[in-house]
Every structure is written in C-alpha cells, then in structure tokens.
Image: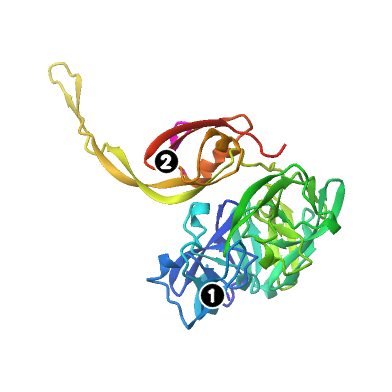
Amino acid sequence: MLDKGVTSQKIRFELVNNVIIIPVEINGLPLKFLLDTGVSKPIVFNFLKASDSLKVLHAEKIKLKGLGDGDYIDALRSSHNTFKIGNAVNTDQTFFAIFDPSVNFAPKLGIAIDGIIGYDLFKDFIVEINYSNRFIRLHKPDKYSYKDCKKCETFNLEFNNNKPYVNAEVLTDGHEISVKMLIDTGSSDAIWLFEDAEKNLTLSKNYFYDFLGSGLSGNVYGKRTKIDALKLKRFMLENPKAAFPDSVTIASVKKFKDRDGTLGGEILKRFNSIIDYTNSKLTLKPNHFFNKKFSYNKSGLQVEHDGVRLVMEIDMSNNVATINQNKATSELEVKSVIANAYKYTIKPSYVIYNIIKDSPADLAGLQKGDIIYRINGNGTQDMTLKNLVGHFYQKEGTKIKLLVDRNGKTMKFEFLLQSPIK
C-alpha cells in the first residue's frame, strides 16, 4: 500500500534484453527483481547470494514446477515478510526461496538478478509501464482516472491461475487466426505459439531449431520462424518473430487449454501500457519502438556471462611530468618520468553456451564452452553482454572475427553473419 494521501509512486527500471528489472527491498535487504506478469507469488532464485542477510521468516519446505525440461525443484515458502517497492509497502508478503544455484537467470541477462515478482504487485495497483522512458508508476485503483487517448486501444483481460490473457489475431500462411495469449513481461522473446492443427496454428517450412530460454525447471527448446503479422485490434505488427516451443518443455504451462501462446517483452516494449487487474483491462499506446524491425541473431551463437577473470593492465598512475622555465631563455622544459607498472583488475567473462547446428559460427568451428576474449579487434572485458551480442544482429554479410580461449589455448575464428530465416 501507499502512504495516506499518496495516489501514485514512480519507480525507475532497467530494461535488459526486453525485460524489466526493478528495485525491491525484502525485510530491509535491497535486491533486484524481474517484473513478470506470468508469475504468481514472488520468487527469490539467486538465493545463495542473499542467504547470509535475507531473513526467511516462517518457512516451510515445498516443491515447485515451472517452465522447462527439468523436474520439480526444492524451495521454501516464507510468509509474513515486508516487501518495499519505492514507497509502496506490503508487511504480509509470502514468497518462495529457491536454493538450487542452477536456477539463476543472471548469466543470460548479464546483470545480477535476485528474483521475480508479478501478480502480488499487479493485483494491488493499476500499473503504468512506460518502456520509452523506463519507469513504472503504481496507482491506487480507487484514485485512478483514465484519460482520453485517441492513439490507445483497450483490451479485456481474462485470468487463469492469476495470470492475464488477451485476445489477438495472428496472420500466417494465408490464415487469420484468433488466439488467446498470455501477457508475459518476464519473457524476452516476441511471440510463442502452441501448435494446433485444428486452428491452423502450424509451423511453416521456413524455420530453425533453437534454444528459446530458461525457466524454473530447466531449458526450453523449439523452432523459430516468422509470421506474416500480429494484430492487436487496429495495431498491426508485420513479420514478427515467432517461436513454437517443444510440447514436452511446455507441458506444465499448457494446462489452460484455451491458451494459444505468449506475448513477450519484444512485443510489449513497443507499447506504453496500463495494466489494470482490478477492472480486467489492458491499455496499449504505441511508442518509438513500435516500428522497429524484428531482427535475428545471425551468428548462431548464444553467449552468457560466465563470472569474472583477472586482466592485466598498464597502471599509468605513477607517471610524473615536471615543467620548469629556463631563466636565461624563458623556454619551458618538460621532463617526464615514465614508471609504468601493471595491475590486475576484475573484468566480466563471456562464454558460448549454445550453438545452432550448421550456423555460421558452427561451420567456422566454434564450440560450446569457448570463452570470447575479443570481437572484431575489441576486448570483451569492457563490454556489457548486450554490447557483445549486439554484434550478432548486424546486417547479413557482416564479418565477425573472434579471439577465444578453449581449454587454455587461444584460437581465432571468423565468419559472415547470415539470417537463419529468409
């Protein structure tokens, strides 16, 4: 809840790989959480980092099953906790704490993430998400008034297991198909579709097999393609990326039989939105991302943050320059003492965790586990994961040169970017 007399609260967020990261304080401990409409109770999944200082109150052991190809995982259910987001405070919050260190999305995002929060935030507020300026605003439902907006469209939300669904249309292979889609701010992808021959939701021949992402219960694989268009009332997004996940890995989320897929962050970020659980409404307004073309990783490489490494650098701090004036000639004499030494600094390390078969990187000889030191002549130690991966989204035909470490041996590779979808 917000303090008496306060009707809204603005909170800045980080937009990383199409997902929203917000600051959350749990029992006095500041953490970073992914904002995910597809999750019910908050989850702390990078638990080992916070185990010494996070107070887990009134805990009981449970098992959780989420998206992915794995099994149930052990967790603690903790109740009567204090959650604080900006000045919004809940003093009786339940969350799940996961001990398994493999449940950690930070390597894929390139920044430390401590957990996920969703329904328990959205149910208490009308949540305005401004992707353009990277903030959310929490509004008290009884104090919020909708403004006239000619550029907006409003949709009815349906709920199943506390998760929001919206109706849309997809255009593919000459068919316009009505679909019910989960609104999932926690997915970095554009569209997921579940194959259904009766609805003509079938995969075209133009696709490639790919790693689609990670869930609480493991990895998700499937086929990537593109469809002709996605329609959200009058809003038409042309040639969006679409993925058809393997049926085995999504079995746990397909219990809601009316669900046809997911709208993820790469679609949602193209709108500034108002998500109103109280009145079951979603309002969308196109922003400057709306007309941005959908692009593919054209290398076949998927890279993640792999901890840190020590890098030796020149330390210039002891270099000294002196300036003296010659009294006889009035000329300035500059003398410098060069005392370069070396220092070791901690820098991020990036590793290849997946390679698409027969992709440019695969055919060039790169392998899973290779550590990328340099790309096109630039050291990766001073790059973010986003900067590094951005090289793989450049135009087709761009040359990529990589210097990698493979089991202690330095190796060079080069290839040309090639779109996996024509």
| Scheme of colours in the image | rainbow
Report the front residue among 51 and 218: 218
182 with respect to 178 (left or right)? left
**Total residue callouts:** 2
Q: Residue at horizontal 43%, vertical 34%? A: 411
Tell us which disc is closer to us: 1 or 2. 2
SS at mark 1 in the image: strand
Mark 1 or mark 2: which comes first in sequence? 1
Q: Residue at horizontal 41%, vertical 40%? A: 405
Report the front residue among 300 and 35: 300
Label 1 crowd bin: few (<14), some (14–19), many (20+), radius 10 Å: many
Q: Is residue 141 visible?
A: yes
Report the front residue among 242 and 219: 219
Residue with the mark numbered 1: 95
Magenta stretch bounds? 371-383
265 with respect to 13 (left or right)? right
- Tell me the tag on residue 299: none
Q: Residue at horizontal 64%, vertical 60%? A: 185
Q: Is residue 205 magenta?
A: no
- Tell me the tag on residue 406: 2
Report the quarter where the C terminus lies: top right
- Amino acid carrying mark 2 in the image: Arg
SS at mark 2 in the image: strand
**Residue 252 picture quarter:** bottom right
Q: Is residue 221 above or below residue 48?
A: above
Q: Position of residue 283 (x, y in %)?
A: 74, 61
